[in-house]
Image (spheres, rainbow, N blue to C red):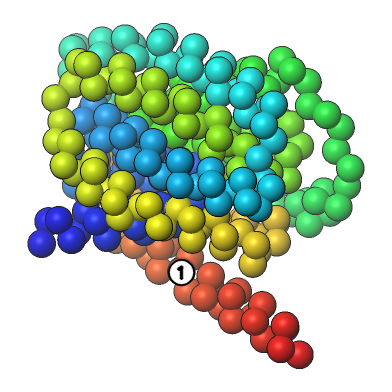
Amino acid sequence: MTIILFFFLGGIISVLGGFFGVGGGFILTPILLLSGFAPVVAVTTSLLFTIGTSVSGIFAHFRLKNIMWKEGIISGFSGVVATQFAHPLVLYIERIGWDDVVIPVFYAALLGYFAISLLLRGKKASVREKQTLKKPALVKIIIIGLAGGFVSTVLGVGGGFIMVPLSMSVLGYEPKKAVGTSLFAVLSIVSVGFISYALTVSFDYRIGLLLIAGGLVGSQFGAKLTAYFHNYEISLLLSMLYIATFFSVILKLLKLSEIGLGLLSVFVFFFFAFSFFKIHQKKSERMV
């Protein structure tokens, strides 16, 4: 039963990860925390899972021509540098016994900020996606990569969790380009981050591999789903995911983990129901 559960969970999360370009770990980390995993173990497991889903998602977005290679390499390298500063910080927080509070609070603060920023941006996205955007400054790309790498290592997320919304708001990328480029940069970030943790933290590799096995197909499907959505719809759905995850983390801090898991389940149901509607709508338009 446990094998089926983690396999199924990996598949669902990877669909969301491939669709939003967040690598999957952004969604998996709070679920593991809500399920009773120690914060550092949850972070390590999520990083391993994100490696697998990122590889699969990159192939899908490559075919869709959603990856900006130069920008992805620069932000990815910057993120790798940041992981080396974040890793010892997390281990120190764990040693002094603050990891159960500091990591969830930091997570919730970032989720709240990006949920609001994406909601505000969603009102303008349908207009901006038709505009010709200026080439982003190199310094901005590096700073976003550093931020993604730091957050990735501290929270066990792919880095796309912070890089996707920043790429849209600061660099002006359209959501589909932000998603594809983020996944490419995330691969190098999470690989280095995972190796750093794997050498110092004991965790169950079987769980990580089961999650990856379930996610290999899911991330491909998630990436392909973006073709059925407008850019502003992707932005709004991502903001909804951030809001649901934000409240689930708050509920975790309030010792209401079951309600937090239920809230995330509601969002997942809505996302797949809406996706089914969009696919059906697209097919109907083609038949007319």
Q: Give residue 231's position: percent from left, percent from top.
A: 70, 55
The residue that appears at 65% across and 53% down in the rendered structure is 64
Which image quarter: residue 47? Answer: top left
What kind of element bears circle 1?
Answer: helix
Left or right? Give the position of 270 relative to 174: left
The residue that appears at 27% across and 20% down in the rendered structure is 197
Left or right? Give the position of 141 relative to 147: right
The residue that appears at 54% across and 46% down in the rendered structure is 59
Q: Give residue 287's position: percent from left, percent from top.
A: 71, 89
Query: In front here: 7 or 59?
Result: 59
Q: Report the quarter where the C terminus lies.
A: bottom right
Q: Is residue 264 visible?
A: no
Q: Give residue 132's position: percent from left, percent from top.
A: 89, 42
Query: In front here: 114 or 56?
Result: 56
> Can you say whether 10 is above or below 205 in the image?
below
Query: In front here: 208 or 69?
Result: 69
Callout 1 amino acid: Phe
Q: Give residue 75's position: percent from left, percent from top.
A: 60, 23
User: Pointer 1: what residue?
Assistant: 272
Which image quarter: residue 7? Answer: bottom left
The residue that appears at 59% across and 81% down in the rendered structure is 280
Which image quarter: residue 144? Answer: top right
Query: In front here: 239 or 287?
Result: 287
> Can you say whether 150 is above or below 279 in the image?
above
